[in-house]
Amino acid sequence: MTCTQLAAATSRQSPTLATRGAGVAKRWWHAYWEWRARKATVFILRSLDCRTLRDIGIHPSEIESLVYDRGNDRRRRYDATWPWRSGGT
């Protein structure tokens, strides 16, 4: 069997239970940290005074809807790809 045939044969195999379990754990872990990041964002925004919130264009009643994507304003939404979230620039 050549390398190409071997690679094709192994790519057709269904994922093992361990692989599927690892995938589920990875998705859960990312969801958990996404939840934590959103919760921290709400906490930080709630700690700001009304004047500061007004300066950045947010009303105190909008905080949770903006963070949890319940608002219809697509310009102002929580963005998980911000550089400070991923540790890069």
Image (cartoon, grey):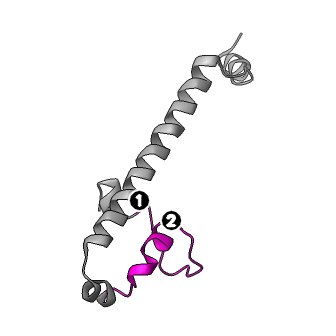
**Residue type at tag 2:** Tyr
- State the predominant SS element of the stretch in magenta: loop
Q: Farthest residue in the front direction?
A: 61
Neighbor class of circle 1 (other Cα within 10 Å; few <14, some 14-19, many 20+) is: some
Helix, strand, or loop for circle 2? loop
The location of residue 33, given as percent across then percent down, is 41, 47
Return the residue nearer the eye: 61 or 6: 61
Report whether 42 appears left or right of 49.
right
Question: Which residue does the image show at 33% across and 58% down from the upper left?
Answer: 40
Q: Quadrant of the C terminus?
A: bottom left
Q: Farthest residue in the top direction?
A: 1
Task: Classify residue 1 by image quadrant.
Answer: top right
Report which residue position mark 1 lands on.
Answer: 38
State which tag comes first along the sequence, 2 or 1.
1
The location of residue 30, given as percent across then percent down, is 46, 43
Report whether 40 appears left or right of 6.
left
Report which residue position mark 2 lands on.
Answer: 68
Task: Classify residue 80 by image quadrant.
Answer: bottom left
**Residue type at tag 1:** Arg
CA gap, disc 2 and disc 1 = 7 Å
